[in-house]
């Protein structure tokens, strides 16, 4: 990437990672904190409060994605960040399950992930776009790892309300970056937008949308259980970062060569299939885990596959929908949010009714279905050679 592409991508990756931090910071501690709140003894209600962020996002991704195609990315991203800040302040004001759910719903209404991904695609050339999307995907994984490391210590120091205040401050900082650092990117009027129906029913995009649903449903459901497994294995909550941090960092080193080779040889379909298989293996491995070491191995396998898919899938969506990137990524992020919500709610219900390990069995079944769907995907289109790559 040239300096402009790198600077813009890093800024957008930081904003994207911040919003995901608003989700991930709660995963390691919320189910434990909620036990002391009215209704917190029911995993289903805790899952609903955790997942409402995502179902509200699902309602706004497509409208805001299409709006960003029409009026530009910057105003949509700036407005969405302002809602993120407002929702975080609502959550900080009341330590009550209902008000936390309301505040997280407001945070979710600022559904800007589609606009950000489309903005990355706008500001990068096609031959470097997978790397740019990998940086954005990396920001998700890094925010996830960071949340697992810092959530418990911050929670002990300033409580859940303090965490939401920190998120509000970070949201204001992201608004400043959006306004002052990122370029104003007006929509291109040359190519007409594809209709929402055309984008939604395009076979390649349908496969990717199904995939992101399964990916994030299994992710959030899994992390309703993993903290409990670590505690049962003898590792206190405050020490969970000792497993999460090395696992996530090592997963980056393991996935990077696979992604680079797949991109250079233009063989990304096998990389996608390998990543799904890794997730399936991890879910099966979790069913038989009982020690801290075996849990760490399962997490490592999981994060290698997860990081590969977070880098690959948004880039592929932008390549399959060049004329309507905001709309296509809006649909993609909508299914992602529905997946996160479904994983939280169904995962909580499975824990209540069938026990913790049933979550991993259901996740493995979903991943097997995804593998069958993805298997028929044709090899991805070759990248356009750009003679201006040295600009």
Image (cartoon, rainbow, N blue to C red):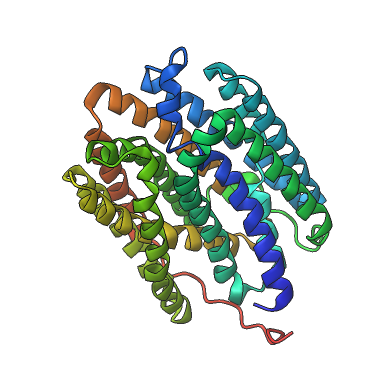
**Up-down: is 252 above or below 203?**
below
Most distant residue in the top direction = 38
Which picture quadrant has residue 83? top right
Which residue is found at the position 21% from the left and 48% from the top? 284
The residue depicted at 56 percent of the width and 23 percent of the height is 101
Relative to residue 176, is residue 220 drawn left or right?
Answer: left
In the image, 33 versus 118, the foreground residue is: 33
Q: Position of residue 140 (x, y in %)?
A: 52, 53
Question: Residue 224's image quarter?
Answer: top left
Q: Point out the residue furthest to the front here.
A: 157
Residue 293 visible, this orientation = yes
Residue 60 shows up from this direction: no
Q: Residue at x 42, y 38 (%)?
A: 28
| On screen, residue 25 above or below 355 | below
Closest to the observer, 367 or 345: 345
* Picture residue at 47% right of the left edge, 76% below the top: 263
Residue 275 point in image, percent of width and height? 35, 61
Q: In what quadrant of the picture does the N terminus appear?
A: bottom right
Total labels drawn: 0
**In front here: 84 or 194?**
84
Q: Position of residue 297 (x, y in %)?
A: 25, 56
Position of the C terminus, as image quadrant, is bottom right
Left or right of 165 on screen, residue 247? left
Q: Position of residue 85 (x, y in %)?
A: 71, 36
Choose top left, top right, bottom left or bottom right for residue 95.
top right
């Amino acid at each position: 990437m040239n300096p402009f592409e790198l600077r813009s991508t890093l800024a957008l990756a930081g904003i994207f990672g911040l919003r995901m931090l608003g989700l991930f910071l709660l995963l390691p501690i919320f189910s434990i904190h909620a036990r002391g709140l009215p209704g917190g003894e029911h995993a289903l209600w805790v899952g609903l409060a955790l997942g409402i962020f995502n179902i509200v996002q699902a309602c706004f991704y497509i409208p805001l994605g299409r709006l960003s195609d029409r009026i530009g990315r910057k105003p949509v991203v700036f407005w969405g960040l302002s809602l993120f800040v407002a929702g975080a302040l609502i959550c900080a004001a009341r330590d009550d399950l209902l008000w936390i759910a309301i505040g997280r719903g407001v945070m979710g209404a600022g559904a800007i992930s589609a606009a950000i991904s489309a903005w990355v695609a706008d500001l990068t050339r096609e031959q470097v776009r997978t790397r740019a999307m990998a940086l954005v995907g990396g920001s998700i994984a890094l925010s996830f790892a960071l949340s697992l490391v810092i959530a418990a210590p911050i929670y002990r120091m300033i409580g859940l309300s303090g965490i939401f205040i920190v998120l509000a401050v970070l949201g204001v900082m992201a608004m400043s970056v959006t306004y002052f650092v990122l370029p104003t990117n007006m929509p291109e009027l040359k190519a007409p937008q594809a209709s929402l129906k055309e984008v939604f029913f395009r076979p390649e995009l349908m496969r990717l949308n199904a995939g992101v649903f399964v990916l994030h449903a299994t992710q959030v459901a899994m992390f309703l259980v993993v903290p409990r497994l670590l505690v049962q294995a003898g590792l206190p909550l405050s020490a969970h970062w000792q497993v999460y941090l090395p696992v996530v960092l090592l997963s980056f080193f393991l996935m990077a060569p696979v992604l680079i080779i797949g991109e250079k040889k233009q063989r990304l379909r096998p990389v996608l299939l390998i990543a799904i298989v890794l997730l399936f293996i991890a879910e099966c491995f979790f069913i038989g885990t009982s020690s801290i070491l075996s849990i760490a191995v399962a997490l490592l396998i999981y994060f290698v596959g997860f990081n590969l898919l977070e880098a690959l899938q948004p880039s592929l969506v932008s390549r399959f929908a060049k004329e309507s990137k905001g709309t296509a990524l809006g649909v993609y992020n909508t299914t992602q949010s529905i997946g996160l919500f479904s994983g939280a709610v169904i995962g909580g219900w499975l824990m209540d009714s069938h026990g913790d390990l049933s979550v991993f069995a259901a996740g493995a079944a979903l991943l097997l279905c995804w593998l069958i769907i993805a298997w028929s995907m044709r090899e991805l289109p070759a990248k356009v050679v750009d003679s201006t790559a040295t600009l």
